[in-house]
Structure formats: C-alpha cells, structure tokens
Amino acid sequence: MTAAENSEPVTNDRVHTLTVGDDVVVATMTVDAPRSVVFTAFTDPAVLAQWFWPQRFGTRIELDPRPGGAFSIRADGLGAGQEMGVSGTYQDVESPGRLAMSWQWSGESAVSHVAIELSEVRETRTEVVVTHSANPSTADRDGHLQGWRDCLGRLIEASGTLRLALRGQ
C-alpha cells in the first residue's frame, strides 16, 4: 500500500480511525446522545472541558463558535515548564450539524484544518466524523490520529453525563 492510499482502519473500542494519504486523519464514532447535545459538547466551553482532554490537564477553554470566531484550548494543569494548547478560527458553524476550523498548536507555525460532521442516526444517537487535514507531516498526522481517538473515546464515556447536565440548562 502506498502512502497515498487509505490506511487500514483502526478501532479503539467504538472510535474508528484511518489515515488518507500523508496528511489526513478521519475519526468516526457513534454517541448515545441527540445531535443537539453532541453539537453543544463541541461548542460550549464548560461541556467541552468535561471530555476534550484528561481532567488532570486542567483545561481552560475559550470559544466563539461562529464563522470568523476564535477558539483556544489550554492545559493549565501540566508540570512546570510544560505547555500545551491549540487555537484557531472557525470557518463554518452550522448548528447542529457541522463545524470547521483552523488548528494550530502553541509554539508551532503549521496550521491544519478540522471538520466535524454530526449526523443523526436516530433521535437519540449521533454519528460523529472528524476529518483533520493539511497535517504538515506524517508524524503530525499520526499524532492527531491518536489524539482524536483518545478525545472521542472520552466523549463516548461522558455522553450520558452530558445529557443529564444539559437537561438542567
């Protein structure tokens, strides 16, 4: 198989990932929550902080989910001298079905792109497809493959809790 061909899909519990060529990651999973709840999980800072990174990271999130709006996700709970953060600009926001944004890690010049598609499987289930493209290297691509697999796995684990929390709003 050449690098330009699709890789074999990888499954981590219920998150399926694959690479396309040298620079694209696709992660797919189904969440036991309505599409509007899943959209909120990606666009409400308090909800996103519950699952995006491990709790030990002390995640600080700022979101302005509208075309042209910015986002910033930072880990405050890392050890001295360690920094981790990502930021970007929303290009497309279509509630409750689509988000697209630029993606730039702190301290790095490369900008990649993330598109999130949410499709209703049935009233209480949502398929999530994350496509992370324009990765500057295969190492970055593979790092994002693992990162999305981990993040989306935490979203699956948190989906029941998120539904209950959002009912109270």
Image (spheres, rainbow, N blue to C red):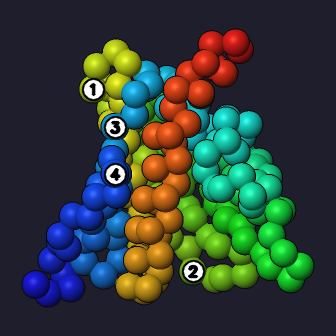
Which amino acid is tagged 3? Thr
Q: Which residue occupies 67% across, 35% down?
A: 47
Q: Which residue is mark 3?
A: 30
Rounded to the nearest whole Å, what is the CA distance between mark 4 and mark 1? 19 Å
Q: Secondary structure at mark 1?
A: strand
The answer to the question of whether label 3 and label 1 lie on touching residues, with beta carbons closer than 8 A, is yes
How many other residues sit within 10 Å of disc 1, few (<14), some (14-19) or many (≥20)?
Answer: some
Report the mark closest to the observer, 4 or 3. 4
Rounded to the nearest whole Å, what is the CA distance between mark 2 and mark 1? 35 Å
Report the mark closest to the observer, 3 or 2. 3
Which amino acid is tagged 4? Asp
Q: Viewer-proximal residue, 133 or 7?
A: 7
Q: Which residue is mark 4?
A: 13
Residue 72 at x, y percent in the picture: 73, 56
Whichever of callouts 2 and 4 sits on the residue coming sooner in the sequence is 4
Q: Which mark is residue 121?
A: 1
In the picture, which quadrant includes the C terminus? top right
Q: Is residue 39 visible to the viewer in this orientation of the structure?
A: no
Whichever of callouts 3 and 2 sits on the residue coming sooner in the sequence is 3
Q: Is residue 20 left or right of residue 157?
A: left
Whichever of callouts 4 and 3 sits on the residue coming sooner in the sequence is 4
Whichever of callouts 2 and 1 sits on the residue coming sooner in the sequence is 2
